[in-house]
């Protein structure tokens, strides 16, 4: 997928975003969320232990670029002096939630350089469980509405893995 196509796809999904509400999860339970518009809660795929482990790993590995609160760089949608996009927010206010879990995992492993970005890959520093823990921490910052939309997209991606290979 060329860079312009990727940027277009990412920009198309930036409408109707909401901010972070720092979801709290009861100790030892799967994270569950409910919004007023939902008829039933959406169980989150992670638990509080993953969120806690992921928070520490995030601070060590990701916070220097994506900020300690996952708010990313101001003006992250604008090219920097080198012609690159700066690190986006990961807190549900940018495009991260548009990607299925498999793509998020792959992005952490191989980085964004193959897609024209500047994020390095972390496959030599983080194992699969650590990557999942970081993603759990990141997603724990997503509102119920954003998580529910992401969850539905993720289910569709699981049903159509060939879509992930296009581009």
Image: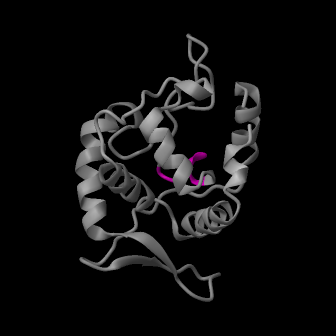
Identify whether 70 is placed above or below 37. above
**Nearer to us in this view, 5 or 143:** 5
Residue drawn at x 42%, y 31% as measured from the top left: 121
Residue at the top extreme, as displayed:
82
Q: Residue furthest bottom?
A: 39
Q: Residue at x 57, y 26 (%)?
A: 114
Most frequent secondary structure within the magenta stretch: loop
Say which quadrant the C terminus sits in: top right
Is 94 in the magenta?
yes
The spot of residue 159 in percent (x, y) is 68, 66
Image location (x, y in percent) of residue 16: 70, 56
- In the displayed structure, would residue 134 be above or below residue 126? below
Question: How many numbered circles are shown?
Answer: 0
Q: Position of residue 104 (x, y in %)?
A: 51, 48
Residue 163's place in the image compared with 145, above or below, is above
Residue 61 image position (x, y, % from top left): 29, 37
Task: Check residue 29 for magenta coloring.
Answer: no
The one nearer the camera, 25 or 124, is: 124
Q: Which residues are magenta?
A: 91-97
Q: How is the image coloured?
A: one colour
> Residue, x 61% and y 14% (percent of image)?
83
Q: Is residue 154 above or below residue 72?
A: below
Residue displayed at 40% across by 67% down: 23
Q: Nearer the viewer, residue 20 or 7?
A: 7
Q: Where's the N terminus, which quadrant? A: top right
């Amino acid at each position: 997928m060329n860079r312009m196509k990727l940027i277009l796809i990412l920009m198309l999904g930036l409408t109707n975003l909401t901010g972070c509400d720092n979801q709290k999860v009861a100790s030892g339970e799967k994270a569950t969320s409910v919004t007023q518009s939902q008829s039933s809660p959406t169980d989150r795929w992670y638990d509080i232990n993953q969120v806690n482990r992921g928070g520490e790993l995030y601070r060590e590995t990701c916070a220097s670029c994506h900020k300690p609160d996952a708010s990313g760089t101001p003006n992250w949608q604008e090219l920097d002096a080198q012609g690159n996009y700066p690190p986006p927010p990961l807190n549900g206010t940018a495009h991260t939630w548009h990607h299925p879990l498999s793509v998020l995992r792959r992005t952490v492993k191989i980085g964004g350089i193959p897609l024209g970005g500047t994020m390095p890959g972390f496959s030599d520093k983080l194992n699969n469980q650590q990557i999942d823990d970081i993603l759990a921490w990141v997603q724990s910052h997503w509102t119920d509405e954003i998580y529910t939309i992401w969850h539905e997209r993720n289910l569709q991606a699981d049903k159509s893995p060939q879509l992930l290979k296009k581009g």
